Amino acid sequence: MKTLKKRRRVQVIVLAAVALALSTAFIGVALKDGINYFRSPSQVIAEPPKPAEVFRIGGLVEEGSIIRGQGETVYFVVTDGGESVKVAFTGVLPDLFSENQGMVGTGSYVNGVFEATEILAKHDETYMPKEVVDALKEQGVYKDGSDS
C-alpha cells in the first residue's frame, strides 16, 4: 500500500514537470514571433540581417533626405551619426515625423533598404527612445539637454 502511494506521488510529480516543460516551450515559441530586436544603423551596416528578419531601427532622420514618391511611399535616410540606412515606408507618417528628429521603425532590411511597416516619431521636445539615445551616444552624436 505504501509503495503504491509513493509511485502515484512520483507519477504526479513527473507529469507536472513534463507539463511545465511543455508549457514553457509553447510560450517561448509563441513569444519568438512577437519579439523585435533593436538595431542602430551602424549595427545594420556592420552585420546586415537576413531579409526575412523583422527588427526595429532607430536614429535621427537625416536633413534633406525625405523624398515623397509616387503614391504613399516615402523614402528617407536614418542615421546614428556613424552610418546611414535608407528607409522606405508606405503609409501615413506620424504628424511629428520630420528631419533631424528621432524615429524608430519596425520592418526588415531587403537589398540595402530598410522596408518599414511602422514608423514612430518622438512625441515631445525632450523624449527620444532609450535605444536611439544609447546608439547616438555610442557614436558621440547625442547631446544631453544639460550640456548646453
Image (cartoon, helix red, strand yellow):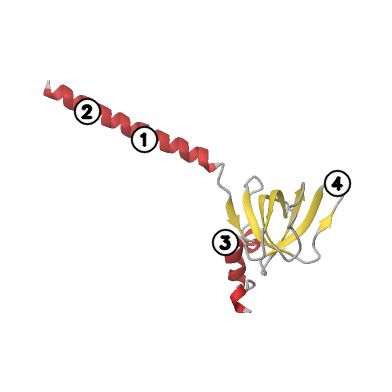
Q: Earlier in the sequence, mark 3 or mark 1?
A: 1
Query: x%, y% of residue 104?
Result: 66, 56
Tell me, yes or no, whether the two marked residues, 3 and 1, touch with CB atoms within 8 Å. no
Residue 113: assigned label: none
Tell me which numbered mark, 2 or 3, is placed earlier along the sequence. Answer: 2
Q: Earlier in the sequence, mark 4 or mark 3?
A: 4
> Which residue is denoted by mark 2 in the rendering?
9
Instruction: Please tell me which of labels 2 and 1 falls first in the chain.
Output: 2
Across and down, in percent, residue 145 comes to 62, 73
| Mark 4, residue position | 71
Instruction: Please identify, in this view, whether the residue under mark 3 or under mark 1 is nearer the observer.
Output: 3
Q: Position of residue 80 (x, y in %)?
A: 66, 66
- Quarter of the image for residue 144 reads bottom right
The reply to whether dot 4 and dot 2 touch (C-beta < 8 Å) is no
Mark 3: amino acid: Lys
Residue 19: x percent and y percent?
36, 31
Q: Residue furthest bottom?
A: 148
Residue 74 to residue 9: above or below: below
In the rendered structure, the answer to whether residue 125 lies left or right of residue 138 reads right
Q: What residue do we see at 59% from left, 55% from top? A: 38
State which quarter of the image contains the C terminus. bottom right
Q: Toward the viewer: 46 or 69?
A: 69
Residue underneath mark 1: 20
Give the residue type that dot 2 points to.
Arg
Q: Quadrant of residue 147?
A: bottom right
Question: To which residue does mark 3 refer?
Answer: 130
- Residue 8: image quadrant is top left
Mark 4 → mark 3, Cα distance in angstroms: 33 Å
Circles 2, 1 touching at the beta carbon (< 8 Å): no
Relative to residue 8, is residue 91 depicted above or below? below
* Local crowd size for mark 1, using a 10 Å CA cut-off: few (<14), some (14–19), many (≥20): few
